[in-house]
Image: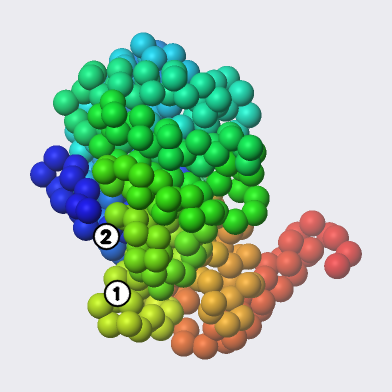
Amino acid sequence: MTIKYGKYEIDQGLFLAPMEDVSDYPFRMICKKLGADVMYSEFISSEALIRDAEKAFKKMTIKPEEHPIGIQIYGNRIEAMVEAAQIAEEKGPDFIDINFGCPVKKVALKGAGSGLLQDIPKMIKMCEAVVRATELPVTAKTRLGWDAENIQITEIAKQMEGVGIEALAIHGRTRAQQYKGEADWEWIAKTKQAVNIPIIGNGDIIEPQQAIEYLDKYGVDAVMIGRGAIHNPWIFRDAKIYRETGIVPELPTIEERVNILKQHYLYNVEYKGEKRGVKEMRKHVSGYLKGLPHIAKFRARMVRIDTLDEIIEMLEMLKATPHIKDLIARIDKEDNEALKMTCSTEGDIC
Ligand SMILES: Cc1cc2nc3c(=O)[nH]c(=O)nc-3n(C[C@H](O)[C@H](O)[C@H](O)COP(=O)(O)O)c2cc1C
Protein backbone atom coordinates (compact mmCIF):
# COMPACT_ATOMS: atom_id res chain seq x y z
CA MET A 1 0.00 0.00 0.00
CA THR A 2 1.31 3.43 -0.92
CA ILE A 3 1.77 5.82 1.99
CA LYS A 4 0.79 9.37 1.16
CA TYR A 5 2.18 12.43 2.89
CA GLY A 6 0.64 15.33 1.00
CA LYS A 7 2.23 15.35 -2.46
CA TYR A 8 4.66 12.55 -1.57
CA GLU A 9 3.78 8.93 -2.26
CA ILE A 10 6.01 6.29 -0.74
CA ASP A 11 6.03 2.61 -1.68
CA GLN A 12 7.92 0.02 0.35
CA GLY A 13 9.70 2.84 2.13
CA LEU A 14 12.77 2.71 4.33
CA PHE A 15 12.15 5.14 7.17
CA LEU A 16 14.59 6.64 9.64
CA ALA A 17 13.15 6.22 13.17
CA PRO A 18 12.64 9.26 15.37
CA MET A 19 15.38 9.21 18.02
CA GLU A 20 15.89 11.81 20.69
CA ASP A 21 19.35 13.41 20.55
CA VAL A 22 20.13 11.39 17.42
CA SER A 23 17.68 12.11 14.59
CA ASP A 24 18.32 15.83 14.57
CA TYR A 25 18.69 17.53 11.22
CA PRO A 26 22.44 16.85 10.84
CA PHE A 27 21.94 13.08 11.14
CA ARG A 28 18.78 13.19 9.09
CA MET A 29 20.56 15.00 6.26
CA ILE A 30 23.15 12.23 6.19
CA CYS A 31 20.53 9.46 6.24
CA LYS A 32 18.60 11.23 3.49
CA LYS A 33 21.74 11.40 1.34
CA LEU A 34 22.21 7.69 1.98
CA GLY A 35 18.69 6.76 0.94
CA ALA A 36 16.21 7.19 3.83
CA ASP A 37 12.76 7.78 2.29
CA VAL A 38 10.87 9.31 5.19
CA MET A 39 12.15 10.87 8.39
CA TYR A 40 10.81 12.30 11.64
CA SER A 41 11.99 14.94 14.08
CA GLU A 42 13.03 13.85 17.54
CA PHE A 43 9.99 13.71 19.83
CA ILE A 44 8.98 17.14 21.09
CA SER A 45 7.02 17.86 24.24
CA SER A 46 3.70 19.55 23.53
CA GLU A 47 3.94 21.36 26.86
CA ALA A 48 7.35 22.77 25.90
CA LEU A 49 6.02 23.90 22.53
CA ILE A 50 3.06 25.75 23.96
CA ARG A 51 5.37 27.35 26.56
CA ASP A 52 7.47 28.60 23.65
CA ALA A 53 10.58 26.78 24.91
CA GLU A 54 13.53 27.53 22.65
CA LYS A 55 14.97 24.01 22.72
CA ALA A 56 11.66 22.50 21.61
CA PHE A 57 11.38 25.00 18.76
CA LYS A 58 14.91 24.26 17.61
CA LYS A 59 14.00 20.59 17.26
CA MET A 60 11.49 21.61 14.58
CA THR A 61 14.28 22.84 12.27
CA ILE A 62 13.63 21.34 8.84
CA LYS A 63 15.82 21.78 5.76
CA PRO A 64 14.25 21.81 2.28
CA GLU A 65 16.09 18.61 1.29
CA GLU A 66 14.51 16.63 4.11
CA HIS A 67 10.99 16.17 2.77
CA PRO A 68 8.91 14.14 3.30
CA ILE A 69 9.35 14.63 7.02
CA GLY A 70 7.12 14.55 10.07
CA ILE A 71 7.29 16.45 13.35
CA GLN A 72 6.67 14.12 16.26
CA ILE A 73 4.94 15.45 19.36
CA TYR A 74 3.99 13.89 22.68
CA GLY A 75 2.11 14.84 25.79
CA ASN A 76 -0.54 13.95 28.26
CA ARG A 77 -3.05 16.81 27.83
CA ILE A 78 -5.22 16.72 24.74
CA GLU A 79 -5.57 20.54 24.60
CA ALA A 80 -1.79 20.95 24.69
CA MET A 81 -1.39 18.37 21.92
CA VAL A 82 -3.93 20.18 19.75
CA GLU A 83 -2.12 23.47 20.19
CA ALA A 84 1.29 21.86 19.68
CA ALA A 85 0.12 20.24 16.42
CA GLN A 86 -0.94 23.66 15.13
CA ILE A 87 2.40 25.18 16.13
CA ALA A 88 4.26 22.30 14.44
CA GLU A 89 2.18 22.62 11.28
CA GLU A 90 3.50 26.16 10.81
CA LYS A 91 7.04 24.81 10.51
CA GLY A 92 6.15 23.11 7.23
CA PRO A 93 6.41 19.37 7.87
CA ASP A 94 4.53 16.94 5.63
CA PHE A 95 2.80 15.21 8.55
CA ILE A 96 2.37 15.32 12.30
CA ASP A 97 3.23 12.17 14.22
CA ILE A 98 2.04 11.39 17.75
CA ASN A 99 4.40 9.48 20.02
CA PHE A 100 2.64 6.75 22.02
CA GLY A 101 5.75 4.64 22.39
CA CYS A 102 8.30 6.36 24.62
CA PRO A 103 8.87 4.04 27.59
CA VAL A 104 11.03 6.25 29.81
CA LYS A 105 9.63 6.86 33.27
CA LYS A 106 9.59 10.65 33.15
CA VAL A 107 7.31 10.44 30.09
CA ALA A 108 5.32 7.20 30.44
CA LEU A 109 4.57 7.49 34.14
CA LYS A 110 3.21 10.97 33.55
CA GLY A 111 0.66 9.51 31.16
CA ALA A 112 2.39 10.56 27.93
CA GLY A 113 4.21 8.47 25.27
CA SER A 114 3.66 4.78 26.00
CA GLY A 115 1.81 5.82 29.19
CA LEU A 116 -1.26 6.23 27.01
CA LEU A 117 -1.22 2.49 26.35
CA GLN A 118 -2.81 2.31 29.80
CA ASP A 119 -5.63 4.63 28.78
CA ILE A 120 -6.65 3.70 25.27
CA PRO A 121 -9.89 5.76 25.22
CA LYS A 122 -7.80 8.87 25.96
CA MET A 123 -5.21 7.87 23.36
CA ILE A 124 -7.92 7.63 20.72
CA LYS A 125 -9.51 10.92 21.81
CA MET A 126 -6.11 12.55 21.51
CA CYS A 127 -5.68 11.17 17.99
CA GLU A 128 -9.12 12.42 17.01
CA ALA A 129 -8.50 15.89 18.42
CA VAL A 130 -5.12 16.25 16.69
CA VAL A 131 -6.55 15.00 13.38
CA ARG A 132 -9.23 17.70 13.62
CA ALA A 133 -6.73 20.38 14.59
CA THR A 134 -4.49 20.24 11.53
CA GLU A 135 -4.75 20.12 7.76
CA LEU A 136 -1.75 17.79 7.62
CA PRO A 137 -1.93 14.00 7.69
CA VAL A 138 -1.62 12.74 11.27
CA THR A 139 0.21 9.49 11.98
CA ALA A 140 1.12 7.68 15.19
CA LYS A 141 3.92 5.52 16.54
CA THR A 142 3.40 3.06 19.34
CA ARG A 143 4.32 -0.30 20.87
CA LEU A 144 2.44 -3.59 21.08
CA GLY A 145 0.87 -2.73 24.42
CA TRP A 146 1.77 -1.91 28.01
CA ASP A 147 3.03 -5.40 28.88
CA ALA A 148 2.83 -9.01 27.71
CA GLU A 149 -0.58 -9.44 29.39
CA ASN A 150 -1.97 -6.39 27.59
CA ILE A 151 -1.05 -6.63 23.94
CA GLN A 152 -3.76 -4.48 22.39
CA ILE A 153 -2.10 -3.24 19.24
CA THR A 154 -4.65 -4.68 16.82
CA GLU A 155 -7.55 -3.04 18.62
CA ILE A 156 -5.61 0.22 18.96
CA ALA A 157 -4.83 0.28 15.24
CA LYS A 158 -8.50 -0.27 14.33
CA GLN A 159 -9.62 2.54 16.59
CA MET A 160 -6.92 4.88 15.30
CA GLU A 161 -8.01 4.15 11.75
CA GLY A 162 -11.57 4.99 12.82
CA VAL A 163 -10.60 8.48 13.95
CA GLY A 164 -8.50 9.38 10.92
CA ILE A 165 -4.93 8.39 11.75
CA GLU A 166 -3.35 7.93 8.31
CA ALA A 167 -0.47 5.56 9.08
CA LEU A 168 0.79 3.74 12.14
CA ALA A 169 4.38 2.81 13.02
CA ILE A 170 4.63 -0.14 15.40
CA HIS A 171 7.71 -0.97 17.45
CA GLY A 172 7.26 -4.68 18.12
CA ARG A 173 7.87 -4.54 21.87
CA THR A 174 5.73 -3.76 24.88
CA ARG A 175 6.41 -0.82 27.17
CA ALA A 176 7.44 -3.29 29.91
CA GLN A 177 10.14 -4.69 27.62
CA GLN A 178 11.71 -1.27 27.05
CA TYR A 179 14.50 -2.45 24.70
CA LYS A 180 14.90 -5.97 26.09
CA GLY A 181 14.18 -9.20 24.24
CA GLU A 182 13.36 -9.18 20.57
CA ALA A 183 10.81 -7.19 18.60
CA ASP A 184 7.84 -9.41 17.78
CA TRP A 185 7.09 -8.87 14.12
CA GLU A 186 4.28 -11.45 14.10
CA TRP A 187 2.12 -8.95 15.99
CA ILE A 188 3.03 -6.24 13.50
CA ALA A 189 1.99 -8.54 10.63
CA LYS A 190 -1.27 -9.47 12.39
CA THR A 191 -2.11 -5.81 12.89
CA LYS A 192 -1.42 -5.07 9.23
CA GLN A 193 -4.02 -7.72 8.33
CA ALA A 194 -6.60 -6.12 10.63
CA VAL A 195 -6.62 -2.56 9.23
CA ASN A 196 -6.71 -0.62 5.97
CA ILE A 197 -4.23 2.08 6.90
CA PRO A 198 -0.52 1.68 6.12
CA ILE A 199 1.57 -0.01 8.79
CA ILE A 200 5.25 0.78 9.29
CA GLY A 201 7.12 -2.05 11.01
CA ASN A 202 9.88 -1.25 13.46
CA GLY A 203 12.33 -3.06 15.71
CA ASP A 204 15.75 -4.67 15.47
CA ILE A 205 16.51 -4.16 11.79
CA ILE A 206 20.27 -4.04 11.62
CA GLU A 207 21.13 -5.59 8.27
CA PRO A 208 20.23 -4.12 4.87
CA GLN A 209 18.82 -7.41 3.56
CA GLN A 210 16.65 -7.73 6.69
CA ALA A 211 14.95 -4.42 5.83
CA ILE A 212 13.92 -5.70 2.41
CA GLU A 213 13.04 -9.19 3.59
CA TYR A 214 10.84 -7.92 6.42
CA LEU A 215 8.79 -5.79 4.02
CA ASP A 216 7.84 -8.93 2.22
CA LYS A 217 7.80 -11.44 5.07
CA TYR A 218 5.57 -9.38 7.36
CA GLY A 219 3.61 -7.60 4.62
CA VAL A 220 4.17 -4.12 6.05
CA ASP A 221 4.02 -0.97 3.94
CA ALA A 222 7.35 0.40 5.14
CA VAL A 223 10.07 -0.46 7.61
CA MET A 224 11.59 1.92 10.11
CA ILE A 225 15.21 1.71 11.19
CA GLY A 226 16.61 3.28 14.36
CA ARG A 227 19.71 1.88 16.05
CA GLY A 228 20.70 0.05 12.88
CA ALA A 229 21.14 3.44 11.20
CA ILE A 230 23.34 4.75 14.02
CA HIS A 231 25.55 1.67 13.70
CA ASN A 232 25.57 1.90 9.91
CA PRO A 233 24.06 4.96 8.19
CA TRP A 234 24.67 3.21 4.83
CA ILE A 235 21.95 0.70 5.70
CA PHE A 236 19.37 2.60 3.59
CA ARG A 237 21.58 2.73 0.50
CA ASP A 238 22.71 -0.87 0.90
CA ALA A 239 19.14 -2.11 1.38
CA LYS A 240 18.11 -0.38 -1.84
CA ILE A 241 21.05 -1.89 -3.72
CA TYR A 242 20.13 -5.29 -2.28
CA ARG A 243 16.53 -4.82 -3.43
CA GLU A 244 17.72 -4.00 -6.98
CA THR A 245 20.48 -6.56 -7.34
CA GLY A 246 20.11 -9.20 -4.63
CA ILE A 247 23.64 -8.34 -3.53
CA VAL A 248 24.66 -6.58 -0.32
CA PRO A 249 27.38 -4.10 -1.24
CA GLU A 250 30.85 -4.16 0.24
CA LEU A 251 31.48 -1.92 3.22
CA PRO A 252 32.01 1.71 2.16
CA THR A 253 35.58 2.72 1.34
CA ILE A 254 37.62 4.82 3.75
CA GLU A 255 37.19 7.77 1.43
CA GLU A 256 33.38 7.44 1.43
CA ARG A 257 33.30 7.11 5.19
CA VAL A 258 35.55 10.10 5.74
CA ASN A 259 33.56 12.27 3.35
CA ILE A 260 30.23 11.45 4.98
CA LEU A 261 31.57 11.69 8.52
CA LYS A 262 33.14 15.06 7.74
CA GLN A 263 29.85 16.28 6.33
CA HIS A 264 28.06 15.14 9.49
CA TYR A 265 30.57 17.05 11.65
CA LEU A 266 30.01 20.16 9.56
CA TYR A 267 26.21 19.97 9.83
CA ASN A 268 26.45 19.29 13.54
CA VAL A 269 28.74 22.26 14.17
CA GLU A 270 26.49 24.48 12.06
CA TYR A 271 23.49 23.37 14.13
CA LYS A 272 24.96 23.22 17.64
CA GLY A 273 28.09 25.39 17.58
CA GLU A 274 31.64 24.03 17.59
CA LYS A 275 31.99 22.83 21.17
CA ARG A 276 28.71 20.94 21.45
CA GLY A 277 28.67 20.00 17.79
CA VAL A 278 32.04 18.23 17.99
CA LYS A 279 31.36 16.65 21.37
CA GLU A 280 27.97 15.28 20.42
CA MET A 281 29.42 13.56 17.36
CA ARG A 282 31.08 11.05 19.67
CA LYS A 283 28.07 8.76 19.63
CA HIS A 284 28.22 8.59 15.83
CA VAL A 285 31.93 8.09 15.18
CA SER A 286 32.00 4.31 15.73
CA GLY A 287 29.16 3.78 13.27
CA TYR A 288 31.07 5.49 10.48
CA LEU A 289 34.35 3.72 11.14
CA LYS A 290 32.99 0.32 12.10
CA GLY A 291 34.72 -2.69 10.57
CA LEU A 292 37.92 -0.90 9.55
CA PRO A 293 40.94 -2.90 10.72
CA HIS A 294 43.05 -1.44 13.55
CA ILE A 295 40.68 1.52 13.92
CA ALA A 296 40.15 1.47 17.71
CA LYS A 297 43.09 3.71 18.51
CA PHE A 298 42.17 6.23 15.84
CA ARG A 299 38.59 6.33 17.11
CA ALA A 300 39.75 6.76 20.69
CA ARG A 301 41.83 9.73 19.59
CA MET A 302 38.95 11.24 17.59
CA VAL A 303 36.63 11.27 20.58
CA ARG A 304 39.18 13.18 22.67
CA ILE A 305 39.39 16.06 20.20
CA ASP A 306 37.20 19.09 20.65
CA THR A 307 37.91 21.42 17.76
CA LEU A 308 36.57 21.07 14.24
CA ASP A 309 39.94 21.90 12.63
CA GLU A 310 41.65 19.04 14.42
CA ILE A 311 38.85 16.67 13.52
CA ILE A 312 39.14 17.61 9.85
CA GLU A 313 42.90 17.18 10.03
CA MET A 314 42.53 13.70 11.54
CA LEU A 315 39.99 12.71 8.91
CA GLU A 316 42.16 13.98 6.06
CA MET A 317 45.05 12.01 7.54
CA LEU A 318 42.90 8.89 7.55
CA LYS A 319 41.97 9.43 3.93
CA ALA A 320 45.56 10.06 2.87
CA THR A 321 47.15 7.14 4.71
CA PRO A 322 46.14 3.95 2.96
CA HIS A 323 47.34 1.66 5.74
CA ILE A 324 45.64 2.38 9.02
CA LYS A 325 48.50 0.66 10.84
CA ASP A 326 50.92 3.36 9.56
CA LEU A 327 48.53 6.03 10.70
CA ILE A 328 48.26 4.46 14.15
CA ALA A 329 52.06 4.33 14.37
CA ARG A 330 52.12 8.04 13.56
CA ILE A 331 49.46 8.76 16.19
CA ASP A 332 51.44 6.72 18.75
CA LYS A 333 54.58 8.67 17.93
CA GLU A 334 52.76 12.00 18.28
CA ASP A 335 51.19 10.85 21.55
CA ASN A 336 54.60 9.86 22.92
CA GLU A 337 56.12 13.17 21.91
CA ALA A 338 53.24 15.05 23.51
CA LEU A 339 53.70 13.02 26.68
CA LYS A 340 57.43 13.77 26.76
CA MET A 341 56.68 17.47 26.36
CA THR A 342 54.20 17.37 29.24
CA CYS A 343 56.71 15.55 31.44
CA SER A 344 59.53 17.94 30.69
CA THR A 345 57.41 21.06 31.21
CA GLU A 346 55.75 19.83 34.36
CA GLY A 347 58.83 18.06 35.76
CA ASP A 348 56.88 14.84 36.23
CA ILE A 349 58.50 11.45 36.49
CA CYS A 350 57.27 9.42 33.54
C1 LIG B 1 18.51 6.94 21.38
C2 LIG B 1 17.07 6.66 21.04
C3 LIG B 1 16.15 7.69 21.08
C4 LIG B 1 14.80 7.44 20.74
N1 LIG B 1 13.93 8.49 20.71
C5 LIG B 1 12.68 8.29 20.19
C6 LIG B 1 11.81 9.37 19.93
O1 LIG B 1 12.15 10.55 20.16
N2 LIG B 1 10.58 9.09 19.43
C7 LIG B 1 10.16 7.81 19.16
O2 LIG B 1 9.04 7.59 18.69
N3 LIG B 1 10.97 6.76 19.39
C8 LIG B 1 12.22 6.97 19.86
N4 LIG B 1 13.07 5.93 20.00
C9 LIG B 1 12.62 4.58 19.58
C10 LIG B 1 12.97 4.31 18.11
O3 LIG B 1 12.28 5.20 17.26
C11 LIG B 1 12.64 2.87 17.72
O4 LIG B 1 11.26 2.66 17.90
C12 LIG B 1 13.39 1.84 18.56
O5 LIG B 1 14.74 2.20 18.71
C13 LIG B 1 13.30 0.44 17.92
O6 LIG B 1 13.83 0.47 16.63
P1 LIG B 1 15.34 -0.06 16.30
O7 LIG B 1 15.43 -1.47 16.83
O8 LIG B 1 15.43 0.02 14.81
O9 LIG B 1 16.28 0.85 17.00
C14 LIG B 1 14.39 6.13 20.38
C15 LIG B 1 15.32 5.11 20.36
C16 LIG B 1 16.65 5.35 20.67
C17 LIG B 1 17.65 4.21 20.62
Number of residues whose C-alpha sits closer than 10 Å to that of mark 2, classed few (under 14), some (14–19) or many (20 or more): some
x%, y% of residue 46? 40, 21
Is 327 on the left or on the right of 207, as rendered? right
Q: Is mark 1 on a helix, strand or loop?
A: helix
Which mark, residue 243?
Answer: 1
Number of residues whose C-alpha sits closer than 10 Å to that of mark 1, classed few (under 14), some (14–19) or many (20 or more): some
Q: Which of 350 and 242 is in front in this view?
A: 242
Residue beneath the point at 57% across and 86% down: 326
Q: Name which of mark 2 and mark 1 comes first in the sequence.
A: 2
Determine whether 77 is above or below 248 in the image: above
Tag 2 and tag 1, C-beta contact below 8 Å: yes
Instruction: Classify residue 324 by image quadrant.
Output: bottom right
> Looking at numbered disc 2 in the image, what kind of residue is underneath it?
Gln
Residue that carries the numbered disc 2 in the rendered image: 12
Q: Is mark 2 on a helix, strand or loop?
A: loop
Is 243 on the left or on the right of 299, as rendered? left
Q: Which of 304 and 268 is in front in this view?
A: 268
Residue beneath the point at 25% across and 37% down: 166
